[in-house]
Image (cartoon, rainbow, N blue to C red):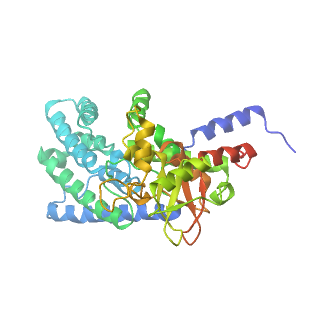
Amino acid sequence: MSVEPRWAAALRARLAGLMPDQQHVNGRERLRAGFGALLGILATVMLGRLFVDGDALLPWVIAPMGASAVLLFAVPASPLAQPWAMLGGNLLAAAIGVTCARGLPEPMMAAAVAVSAAIGLMFVLRCIHPPAGAVALTAVVGGPAIDSLGYGFVVYPVLVNSVCLLALAIVYNRATGREYPQRRAVIVAASPSGAEPAAARGLATEDLDAVLDEYNQVLDISREDLRDLFLRAEAHAYRRRFGTVCCAEVMTRGVIAVQFGTTLEEAWALMRQHQIKALPVVDRARRVVGILSRADFMRRADLDDHRGLSDRLRRFVVRSGRTHGDKAEVVGQIMSAPAQTATESTPVVDLIALLGGAGHSHIPIVDEDGRLSGIVTPRDLIAALYRGRLAAVA
């Protein structure tokens, strides 16, 4: 077997470094983008032909629309492909290009200044759209037909082409399941159980802003999508490390539960007797309707002031004996509802965010019929980790 020379290996490594990262999109998405561009450019050309009205000198569509189509249909989530970026960038660049073509006698200088000024103003107006650079250049070197239009070039073909292509992009992307335009909202990669990933608790918008300021380069991805991808990656990392351990393997069985009508005195006595901090509240079919925690007692008994705490708590949990009154007497009057639950098959990793700081200390576990079958607490997770049941995957 021949050994590859060192220089050949080094050359191959360098050439491999020039290759772009593989795009993680399937054939269906590629077909969707290509067909959308076909429809968009076809519609734009047909509309442009109507505006030309037989004038063979004027173009039906300008070349930069092809580049805009790539953004609008292939990467509709990009900030560079959003409506304001597309319309604002193209129109701004067209106006700058015409101004430079008329104000600077030297075409080479006019072309360079037009593209440079367009980029600078697009930064200021937050409408960066790469094809707009070609629009500015077209206004300068487009030939006699473009020159004859003057500032009319901004209206036709730039505005007409841009509006037509953008309108079809909005309709097509939405019809094919792509959100366009992108909404400016924080997207959270929720787990199957509805829990926010653990990383979301420690990742604030200010953190992303600080990192982007340090990076100091234009990214072809919105801040919201960047945060979403980060959280999804974190969720996958948790699953990779913790495997597929489910709640049924770590939960505490034989759960002590109370019902809506259980008295506060009885519930408090159960919590003290068994040294537990929360009790699931179930109906007669043992379906979870809420959860009662020590925090519920503290909140409703107004125990923020620690002076005389024990006396006030005792008065709060003891029944008054009255048939009417404002004082809470039973569990259902102070419990937290609805309770955050999980199923026996829910991966334990999905509960990390809930138990780690999302306001839950106990997660009731229900079976396939929705009946209470166990409970997971931080102690259960720690015990499982200690036993090696959540050992990291090498």
User: Total label count?
Assistant: 0
- Can residue 291 be seen? yes
Q: Quadrant of residue 306?
A: top left
The N terminus is located in which quarter? top right
- Where 37 falls versus 111 (above or below)? below
Nearer-the-camera pick, 57 or 13: 13
The C terminus is located in which quarter? top right
Nearer-the-camera pick, 176 or 333: 333
Q: Quadrant of residue 44?
A: bottom left
Residue 340 location, x and y as percent? Answer: 48, 56
Q: Residue furthest front?
A: 321
Residue at (24%, 54%) from the top-left corner? 162
- Where 6 falls versus 148 (above or below)? above
Nearer-the-camera pick, 83 or 359: 359
In this rendering, position of residue 390 left or right of residue 284: right
- Can residue 220 be seen? no
In this rendering, position of residue 334 left or right of residue 134: right
Residue 219 location, x and y as percent? Answer: 41, 38
Residue 163 location, x and y as percent? Answer: 21, 56
In this rendering, position of residue 130 left or right of residue 231: left
